[in-house]
Image (cartoon, grey):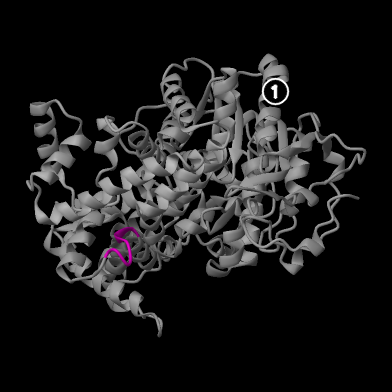
């Protein structure tokens, strides 16, 4: 129903109205999942204008994505029910900061026509600096250097403000790169995304007259998804809100899941300490999910200590109980999920409204394999399908050239991966010789070596990789194809290359390679595996119409589906062991918030599952059900054991003390004394 200017308050509940009507002073709106926070935020903007508290251009609305900003703008225009030339300042932290900086560029030693560089340009600049300063990027990758620079910027630190820790010479070396990097940006009249907010903050701090200008301009400030803000974003807001103190932040501390991006939940939790006399309003009525789903999610998240506290409820029916299923292994889990979709859910919902949410992207492989086998359409949302990922394509290319030496496309893809001084010039030479003599690229390279027509720098790397090709072909006669894959990744230097980068993306790629080797075990030989990959990638292009959604729980935030599957709820995988080892209880609470996000994506049906065994690095290992499963309320779940056993409650009732630091096998050491899987 279209909302007119007369009735924009009529379709709000009591708490939503309270969040809109009280306009003056600081306000924190704690908006639970599916509680209509966007409606509240946009209605508040309209109410400020309708009550003539401020002109539209005296209102600043900050979002985290351009999509959210556009959606809010459209909603505001619709609620105002009029065409207006004057609109609020509405955009992301970065877009608003860029707008401000262009007006006052000279205050930060820039020209107003400065360029905003992207990540690719950042990495190129860092590589050039490292080369000029004789900094060995083989020891530490440019990606890692950039991630540390971004961390410093998120904490509000320019090079002169950074204090390196004693005993960490590498950090000191990276700080020098940071200094040269910032100097170079200034010469280029450029800044990166981190600079947009950081330079704005420094400008406000050093130029009170400019800050005063924006104090007078922004009478009201509204912020969406405040739980995702980092230190420098919070400081930016504090400076702008300092005079009028009319700041309203909307968010959900229970959905703060981006600490790895620099988000600090304490910004949200300490809001009332920073802004005195803060009005806190909780939106707990949910318009998305059934009561059983909400009760399960609320009970789960109640185990977190660092939270504001709220309990979601709905006017809707109780709905289906949350299904909790134990499978024998990961492959049977994928089969079980697909069977439920085929036999039950397809009749009730569109496949587009069904999602499988995983903790780590490598988990999608078994589901992709299953869907390809049964002919069910699927899409990987926010990611690339398994066999289309760069590291998988590279690995398969190695296998293709071992299997068939005339595979020029495979040769071309991996001949210089990792880098071995075989550049475009050498590749052009191979192509020209091959066309002239009707030879494959590999044979051309061999003949050019024999004729001593290869440059000395290229010759060494080329000889090494060609000898490896021959060795691997010999290995294939004695080794299993999946064993050969491990050998190739090791001897080619590919695994070492990813390990050396020391960033989250590379860690994910290493996990995908482990999953690839695991998947290869399902095939009798290399030829049958390569044929499967070729067919899988070509079939993928043919899917039209309805598709099941595959994505990570992180990627699903803000989305909703009729039915949601949450597989792999096992210790070590979820909560993730590496996160627990690095950040302890803080990570555990964030992992639990991620579980809460996953459960609350479901509107009508939610399915949680785990497996007794997982294939990990070539070995079958026992798994331990996630501690989060023990935190689900019995009255809101239905156990559906898929294991053929006389013990009805096999694996559901585990007498385990997680405080002693249980580590799931494969992901870490198995503490067998604590494993009591059978009641």
Residue 366 falls in image quadrant:
top right
Residue drawn at 45 percent across, 56 percent down: 261
Q: Position of residue 180 (x, y in %)?
A: 19, 70
Residue 445 falls in image quadrant:
top left
State the count of labels: 1
Q: Position of residue 348 (x, y in %)?
A: 69, 17
Residue 292 falls in image quadrant:
top right
Q: Is residue 35 above or below residue 577?
A: above
Apparent side of residue 501 relative to residue 652 in the rendered image (left or right): left
Q: Is residue 656 among what the camera can see?
A: yes
Apparent side of residue 330 relative to residue 538 in the rendered image (left or right): right
**Which residue range is magenta in the image?**
137-143
Residue drawn at 27 percent across, 55 percent down: 100
Dot 1: element: helix
Apparent side of residue 488 relative to residue 515 in the rendered image (left or right): left
Residue drawn at 41 percent across, 21 percent down: 538
For label 1, count other residues whose C-alpha is less than 10 Å away and answer few (under 14), some (14-19) or many (20+).
few
Q: Is residue 376 above or below residue 364?
A: above
Q: Position of residue 174 (x, y in %)?
A: 30, 72
Which residue is nearer to you in this view: 291 or 384?
384
Q: Is residue 39 among what the camera can see?
A: no
The magenta stretch spans residue 142: yes
Which residue is nearer to you in this view: 200 or 600?
600
Q: Position of residue 446 (x, y in %)?
A: 18, 41
The magenta stretch spans residue 529: no
Mark 1, residue position: 339
């Amino acid at each position: 129903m279209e909302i007119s200017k007369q009735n924009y308050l009529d379709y709000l509940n009591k708490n939503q109205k309270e969040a809109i009507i009280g306009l003056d002073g600081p306000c924190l709106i704690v908006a639970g999942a599916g509680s209509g926070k966007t409606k509240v935020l946009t209605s508040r903007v309209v109410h400020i204008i309708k009550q003539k508290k401020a002109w539209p251009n005296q209102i600043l609305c900050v979002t985290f994505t351009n999509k959210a900003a556009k959606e809010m703008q459209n909603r505001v225009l619709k609620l105002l029910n009029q065409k207006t030339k004057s609109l609020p300042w509405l955009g992301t932290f970065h877009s608003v900061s860029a707008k401000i900086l262009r007006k006052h560029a000279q205050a930060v030693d820039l020209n107003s026509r400065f360029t905003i560089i992207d990540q690719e340009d950042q990495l190129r600049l860092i590589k050039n600096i490292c080369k000029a300063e004789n900094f060995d990027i083989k020891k530490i990758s440019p990606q890692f250097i950039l991630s540390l620079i971004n961390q410093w910027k998120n904490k509000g630190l320019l090079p002169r403000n950074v204090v390196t820790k004693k005993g960490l010479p590498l950090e000191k070396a990276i700080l020098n790169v940071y200094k040269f990097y910032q100097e170079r940006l200034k010469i280029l009249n450029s800044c990166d995304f981190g600079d947009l907010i950081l330079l704005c903050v420094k400008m406000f701090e050093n130029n009170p007259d400019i800050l005063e200008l924006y104090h007078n301009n922004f009478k009201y400030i509204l912020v969406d998804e405040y739980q995702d803000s980092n230190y420098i974003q919070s400081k930016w807001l504090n400076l702008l809100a300092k005079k009028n103190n009319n700041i309203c932040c909307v968010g959900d501390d229970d959905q703060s899941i981006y600490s790895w991006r620099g988000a600090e939940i304490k910004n949200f939790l300490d809001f009332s300490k920073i802004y005195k006399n803060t009005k806190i309003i909780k939106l707990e009525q949910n318009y998305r999910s059934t009561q059983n789903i909400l009760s399960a999610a609320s009970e789960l998240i109640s185990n977190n200590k660092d939270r504001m506290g709220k309990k979601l409820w709905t006017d809707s029916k109780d709905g289906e109980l949350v299904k909790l299923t134990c499978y024998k292994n990961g492959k049977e889990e994928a089969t079980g999920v697909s069977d439920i979709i085929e036999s039950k859910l397809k009749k009730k919902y569109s496949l587009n409204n069904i999602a499988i949410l995983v903790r780590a992207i490598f988990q999608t492989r078994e589901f992709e394999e299953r869907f390809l086998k049964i002919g069910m359409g699927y899409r990987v949302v926010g990611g690339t399908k398994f066999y289309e990922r760069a590291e998988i394509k590279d690995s398969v290319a190695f296998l293709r050239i071992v299997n068939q030496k005339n595979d020029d496309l495979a040769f071309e893809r991996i001949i210089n991966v990792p880098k071995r001084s075989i550049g475009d010039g050498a590749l052009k030479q191979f192509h020209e010789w091959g066309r002239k003599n009707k030879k494959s690229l590999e044979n051309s390279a061999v003949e050019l070596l024999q004729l001593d027509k290869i440059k000395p720098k290229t010759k060494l790397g080329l000889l090494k990789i060609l000898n490896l090709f021959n060795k691997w072909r010999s290995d294939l006669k004695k080794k299993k194809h999946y064993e050969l894959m491990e050998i190739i990744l090791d001897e080619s230097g590919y695994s070492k290359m990813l390990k050396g980068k020391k960033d989250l993306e590379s860690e994910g790629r290493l996990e995908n390679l482990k999953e690839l080797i695991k998947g290869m075990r399902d095939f009798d030989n290399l030829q049958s595996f390569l044929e499967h990959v070729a067919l899988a990638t070509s079939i993928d292009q043919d899917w039209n119409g309805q598709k099941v959604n595959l994505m990570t729980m992180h990627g699903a935030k803000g989305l909703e589906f009729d039915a949601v599957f949450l597989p792999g709820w096992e210790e070590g995988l979820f909560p993730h062991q590496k996160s627990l080892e690095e950040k302890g209880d803080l990570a555990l609470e964030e992992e639990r918030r991620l579980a809460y996000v996953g459960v609350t994506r479901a509107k009508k049906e939610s399915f949680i599952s785990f497996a007794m065994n997982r294939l990990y690095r070539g070995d079958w290992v026992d798994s331990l059900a996630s501690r989060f499963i023990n935190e689900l309320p019995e009255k809101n779940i239905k156990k559906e054991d898929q294991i053929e056993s006389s013990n009805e409650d096999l694996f559901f009732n585990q007498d385990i003390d997680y405080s002693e630091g249980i580590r799931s096998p494969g992901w870490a050491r198995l503490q067998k004394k604590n494993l009591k899987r059978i009641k």
